[in-house]
Image (cartoon, rainbow, N blue to C red):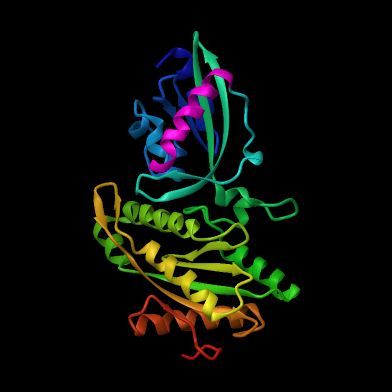
């Protein structure tokens, strides 16, 4: 690595977003600590490797052509102007990200600089509370406050939505056997898988521990909700590898519909929570009361 590129390290380490520097051959020459939060890799695991390892296979051929063109003629591309794009995490999961790109010349060589942000953290609008007050520090999903405010707005507007309450199965065994570091990585992996199943107008949050929730905007019937919930459960249950630990976690999902199952935040959370316990007792991935209204 050139001295000029090394000089960038201190700058990049203070940035909250993942920063990756790539040489003209496509090799990663610098990555900051935040790459772990987005991709699951330690910085040293990326140095010297082809940056295409961070792309899903189906995009690599077209990206190689675009990358060569960008290195020659690259213009800075603002993160806010780009759509959410899929990246490939260490776990094998696709992660929705936004990317800002630029080229720089250092020591007579040209490099591409990518600033990568988890798309889930890029959705805070002017007038909302500061991001840290509505986001989960571990997973960068929303938190309980974000869910509460979103539910209150939807209820006040009379806009139909579905609420899913998720509780992981077998997670505690991994946490107890392998420690909190592995447990935290598994929770981040689950969060990324949840994020791939939600749309821009939906909201995914971590309630706490191994519990998550998803608000699905405009979903007004059990018939529409069931395939979404099933796809979510199937995604979470796929095998994973975190560090040197391989395995799979399951999930029980309970659903509730506004206004069918309640007209207040508390009633809907209770309905979804009770439905989740019904799914757990029935050994099913998903449960929603057929006729409406949660039953203990």
Assess whether residue 57 is covered by the magenta stretch.
Answer: yes
Check the picture and name the quadrant holding the N terminus.
Answer: top left
Residue 36 showing in the rendered view: no
- Is residue 134 something one can see in this rendering? yes
Residue 276 placement: quadrant:
bottom left
Please check the rendered image and state whether residue 101 is part of the magenta-colored stretch, yes or no: no
Find residue 243 and report its horizontal and vertical position in percent.
28, 46
The image shows residue 293 at horizontal and vertical percentages of 55, 89
Query: In which quarter of the view is residue 250 placed?
Result: bottom left
Residue 168, position as x, y percentages in the image: 38, 68
What is the total number of numbered labels drawn onto the structure image?
A: 0
- Residue at image position (61%, 64%) is 145
Residue at the image point whose x is 56% and y is 22% from the top: 103
**Left or right relative to 66: residue 217:** right
- Please state the horizontal and vertical placement of residue 217, each as a whole percent of the image: 62, 68
Relative vertical location of residue 112 with respect to residue 79 in this rendering, above or below: above
Camera-side residue: 65 or 288?
65
Residue at 35 percent across and 48 percent down: it is 92
In the figure, 51 relative to 288: above or below? above
**Whether residue 101 is situated above or below residue 171 in the rendered picture:** above
Q: Which residues are magenta?
A: 56-73
Q: Residue at x 24, y 48 (%)?
A: 244
Front-most of 156 and 145?
156
Question: Quadrant of the rendered structure where residue 172 is?
Answer: bottom left
Helix, strand or loop: magenta stretch: helix
Q: Is residue 190 left or right of residue 256?
A: left
Q: Nearer the viewer, residue 118 or 143?
A: 118
């Amino acid at each position: 690595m050139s001295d000029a590129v090394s000089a960038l390290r201190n700058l990049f380490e203070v940035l909250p977003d993942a920063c990756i520097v790539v040489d003209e051959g496509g090799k990663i020459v610098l990555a900051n600590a935040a790459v772990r939060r987005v991709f699951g890799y330690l910085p040293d695991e990326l140095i010297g490797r082809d940056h295409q390892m961070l792309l899903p296979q189906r995009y690599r051929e077209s990206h190689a052509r675009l990358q060569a063109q960008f290195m020659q003629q690259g213009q800075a591309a603002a993160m806010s102007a780009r759509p959410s794009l899929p990246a490939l995490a260490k776990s094998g999961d696709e992660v929705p990200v936004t990317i800002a790109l630029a080229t720089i010349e250092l020591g007579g060589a040209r490099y591409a600089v990518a600033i990568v942000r988890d798309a889930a953290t890029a959705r805070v609008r002017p007038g909302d509370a500061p991001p840290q007050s509505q986001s989960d520090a571990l997973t960068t999903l929303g938190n309980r406050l974000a869910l509460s405010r979103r539910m209150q707005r939807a209820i006040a507007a009379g806009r139909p939505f579905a609420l899913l309450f998720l509780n992981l199965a077998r997670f505690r065994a991994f946490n107890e056997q392998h420690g909190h570091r592995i447990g935290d990585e598994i929770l981040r992996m689950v969060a990324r898988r949840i994020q791939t199943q939600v749309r821009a107008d939906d909201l995914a949050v971590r309630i706490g521990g191994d519990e998550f929730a998803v608000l699905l905007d405009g979903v007004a019937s059990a018939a529409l909700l069931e395939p979404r919930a099933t796809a979510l459960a199937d995604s979470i249950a796929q095998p994973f590898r975190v560090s040197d630990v391989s395995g799979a976690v399951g999930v029980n999902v309970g659903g509730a519909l506004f206004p069918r199952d309640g007209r207040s935040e508390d009633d809907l959370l209770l309905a979804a929570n009770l439905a989740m316990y019904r799914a757990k007792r029935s050994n099913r991935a998903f449960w929603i009361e057929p006729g409406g209204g949660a039953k203990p």
